[in-house]
Amino acid sequence: MINPKKERTLVILKPDAVQRGLTGEIIKRIERTGLKLVGLKAIMAEADQCWAHYNKDEEWFLKKGTMTVENRKTAGMPVTKEAIEYGRDIIGALVKFMTCGPVVPMVWEGNQAVGIVKKLVGATEPLSSDGGTIRGDFTIDSFELANFDERAVRNLIHCSDKPEEAEREIQLWFKEDELLKYRLVAEQILYDVNLDGIKE
């Protein structure tokens, strides 16, 4: 079992966050929780890396594609391809977006890192994200507009859904020697059981 204090999560600031100059603001919001930043870089993502990151199989493509076909029919839009192709197009649009400009992958570490970051980030759709979350405060995109424009939702940031998923994703974006091992002074107040190292 992983020590809860060492749980790690992956965060990727997407091209819209970088282009809008929100990198520092987003880092500040995560940093204020007490999580520790152990990996950070700015890169141009590769398409293969993004397909591996999203990690969807044929069953997922078919399920999502079937929903897309039904939605298109309901909206009176033409259906021009097989359901599975519409499913692949969902990830294809995400890959196109993630490779259109620089991204900033980060690894954060600390107790409940995955859950803490998910709470800060907000729901996948910015329109339905609560105020006070990163997506709720900094972007106005919606599924409806993204579907209308046939593109990915521009929601600023990716964060891992579960600790095991975080570990898989981290390996796609960071080599082990790129992740730092160090101690923050603040960890004493967050984690020291006896709090006996504070007074002089």
Image: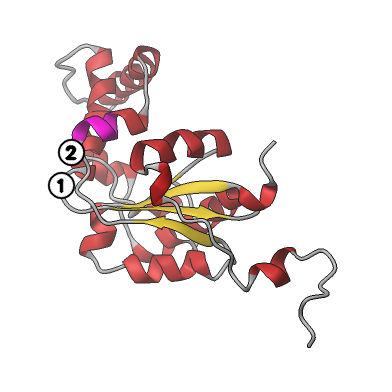
Q: Position of residue 27 (x, y in %)?
A: 42, 66
53 versus 144 height, above or below: above
Q: How many marks?
A: 2
Q: How far apart are labels 1 and 2 at the CA level?
A: 6 Å
Residue 58, by quadrant, is top left
The three-letter amino acid code for the residue at tag 1 is Cys
Per the image, the residue denoted by label 1 is 100
Q: Are marks 1 and 2 in contact (CB under 8 Å)?
A: yes
Q: Is residue 189 magenta?
A: no
Q: What residue sits 45% from the left and 71% below the top?
A: 28
Residue type (three-letter) at the residue carrying disc 2: Lys
Q: Main secondary structure of the magenta part?
A: helix
The front one of 119 and 49 is 49
Residue 76 in picture, x, y percent from top left: 22, 25
Residue 99's image quarter?
Answer: top left
Dot 1, crowdedness within 10 Å: few (<14), some or many (≥20)?
some
Residue 189 visible in the picture:
yes
- Of the 4 image quadrants, the one containing the N terminus is top right
Q: Is residue 91 above or below residue 37?
A: above
Horizontal relation, residue 164 to residue 28: left or right:
right
Query: Disc 1 on helix, strand or loop?
Result: loop
Which residue shows up at 38% across the image and 50% down it?
178
Q: Is residue 48 magenta?
A: yes
In the picture, the quarter occupied by the C terminus is bottom right
Q: Position of residue 43 (x, y in %)?
A: 23, 51
Q: Which mark is residue 96?
A: 2
Q: Secondary structure at mark 2?
A: helix
Query: Furthest-bottom residue in view?
Result: 200
Image x and y of residue 109, in percent: 55, 54
Question: Residues in magenta?
Answer: 47-51
Identify which residue, 108 or 195, lies in the foreground: 195
Nearest the eye: 196 or 161? 196
